[in-house]
Amino acid sequence: MADVSLKEAALIVGVVAACYWNSLFCGFVFDDVSAILDNKDLHPSTPLKNLFQNDFWGTPMSEVTGVVGRAELLSSIFFLAAFLSYTKSKGPDNTIVWTPIAVTVFLVAVATLCKEQGITVVGICCVYEVFIAQGYTLPVLLDTAVQILRGKGSIPFSMLQTLLKLIVLMFSTLLLVVVRVQVIQSQLPVFTRFDNPAAVSPSPARQLTFNYLLPVNAWLLLNPSELCCDWTMGTIPLVESLLDVRNVATLTFFCFLGSLIVFSLRYPGDSSKTVLMALCLIVLPFIPASNLFFPVGFVVAERVLYVPSMGFCILVAHGWKKLSNKSVLRKISWVCLAAVLFTHALKTLHRNWDWESEYTLFMSALKVNKNNAKLWNNVGHALENEKNFERALQFFIQATQVQPDDIGAHMNVGRTYKNLNKTKEAEESYMIAKSLMPQIIPGKKYAARVAPNHLNVYINLANLIRANESRLEEADQLYRQAISMRPDFKQAYISRGELLLKMNKPLKAKEAYLRALELDRTNADLWYNLAIVYIELKDPTEALKNFNRALELNPTHKLALFNSALLMQESGDARLRPEAKQRLLHYVKEEPQDANGYFNLGMLAMDDKKDMEAEAWMKKAIRLQPNFRSALFNLALLYSQTAKELMALPILEDLLRYYPDHTKGLILKGDILMNQKKDIVGAKMCFEKILELDPNNVQGKHNLCVVYFEERDLIKAEKCLVETLALAPHEEYIQRHLNIVRSKIASLGATEGSSLPADGTATAAAEEKKNSFQNLKEVKNEQKTTQTTVDNNKGHSKNKKRTEKNNMDKDTPKKSTKEIKDIEKKRVAALKRLEEIERILNGE
């Protein structure tokens, strides 16, 4: 093997870098999205063993595996490394050097892990050993075999050594094949007629088309002017007759190939050896993709020509060398070589820009081939990702016209109509796609390669119609139909579980999610969904366990972080608060613009009596979302609890500006105005507003009664309390307050000897006014405590000394200060929970 100088290596590297530098500015497109961006095997948390159990896409090889999808370039590197290692296995005097052979076997295994065609390097090594290293020709081998069969000679020692080396190579190859078959569970990959139409065609169309694809690939090597990223579906029409003119290309190809094979095997010399190795590099690596032994998932794929192109380049270089050695053709040969290198370099630079984005890639493919519905679909997907649904719809519809029986195209049309809020048209498209699905065959498993795509028609249609409450059972039937066609269709169980929750059937939803977990226990979303089911089943302990399981699999699972923190907070267990806080802090780190995270951190701080911290969190939530209803109210509540009632007023003003009908906000504002600002008129307006919104609001009406008492309108206060008692006849405090008012009316009547003035204003003596005012404070004090009972909020009532006791209160059992504080704490906590539930229900 000729040595390569440093200058030659630098020149090659420089030319390659110049041709491909602009590819650095391109993004991940086409298969890159599935194979790299969405591949779970590339996540740091994925066990290393999964790389050997899953295919290039991260899918278990026992389900979705063919010759497509491996890293051809990486395989080519190990392919060449294995061959170069084997060339060093011949020692002095034709002895065997075993170390290079061991390294070759290892590199063959690595090349095969990258792409299945890597195993074909073993065949190249065998050809090299026999015809290059040992120098045999086909006539010599045939003559030796004949002599041995006739008993006129024995096998030469050198040939025995060659056989030993070949046996080791072949045995290692067989072992790799056995392992590969075990991994795929002895099942060949299954492809659809859209992937490879000829594979499901009858004879002779099947054989004629497969043979015609060979000259098509050869032409791509010879003249790569029209390249296409996808050659499936109707890219190349079937060759259905012997009279098809394309058969001439097939015949010409086999004649040319046959002449090269005869030349390389029959004649000795360096030229024939060069041609032989070139043919081996062209033919052997292409065999797995040739459809000769098993169908593949494409019609033509330029990527499978990477290794064959090496052999083709050897042929071209060998031919150019022959021409350049002739003095007459030397200048012309150099000019032709320069022209080829220059044009191919320009073509490479231009082609690189086609791979800039998915849109540019598939649009370039449509310039080459307009008969491939998959290309029209992919352009539509690219536009759909840019939210350009109108244009995307045009390409999807064109795909259905190019390939009317393409299920995926009709599904794309339906999905786009749905995005455009055209549900009727979306359902019609899904129904067309569903009608193209094969009939269910009992006991037969649906094709694994097709299921993830085409079976989604049932999922999409069910998701569409379940928006109609009257069609939930119909949607459930579609999910069950998908499951019956493929019992391991995980997404069907997930979607059905969501539907069953909506139908208020949590036990059945639990069964669906458990079945999905049997198929995939590493899916954090499934554990999260199961936790939601346990919340519906009123089992917070199991819910928290499942949230924790989701976070073990995905520590940054945002919904699990947030909802598990809420669940810990709701438990009332102070021991869980630190962990709840840590999860919320993690959540706001992941979602720094979500006000909900800061709000719940504030609620936790309120539970822990960390008032300044709670205030800071609430303010941050309000800064992010100025109309955050619950944050505004709870910040005002926090101020009222910490003797900062006047600071609560501007917060309540903001709250009521966004939500004028916020009852609890009106009550709290009225309470502050009456007790702190002594603004009876303002307080009265708040309570009257409450009654406008809800005439039967007991708390608002009772507070208005207190306002009447404050205004010295005892008659009106009495009437108001009577009406309030009628609304809540079992509330003892209302009856007690009514008795107090009536007692005052009677006292004033006896003092004056006449009825009260018409306006209800007290006109008693100064002492009576003092007594009346003192009793009013008592009523207000009672009322403040009762507000907390009805509204589950407010701050702590200030203790006021009483100068007299009402006879009605003597029979009332007194509570200790500790009991009152405990009750108050529970009431405050209950209000915060109520506000949080209200926020969730309102979608805040």
Image: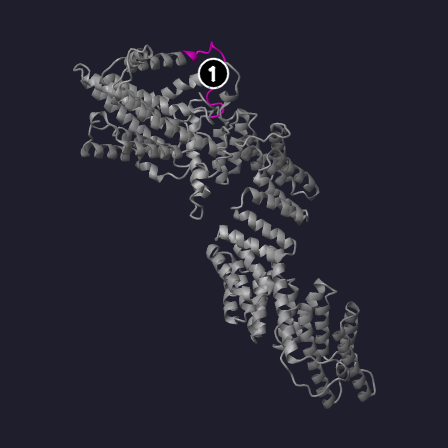
Residues drawn in magenta: 232-248
Of 818 and 230, nearer the camera is 818
What residue is rendered at 64% in x and 46% in y? 509
What residue is rendered at 21% in x and 35% in y? 10
Q: Quadrant of the N terminus?
A: top left
What residue is rendered at 40% in x and 19% in y? 214
Q: Residues within 10 Å of mark 1 (few under 14, many from 20)?
A: some
Give the residue pinned by disc 1: 207
Vertical position of residue 200 compared to residue 533: above or below: above
Instruction: Single out the residue that lies furthest toward the front.
Output: 151
21 horizontally vs 436: left or right? left
Of 441 and 345, nearer the camera is 441
Is residue 718 on the magenta stretch?
Answer: no
Vertical position of residue 23 compared to residue 210: above or below: below
Query: Can the viewer see residue 641 in this picture?
Result: yes
What secondary structure prevails in the magenta region?
A: loop
Of 648 and 679, nearer the camera is 648
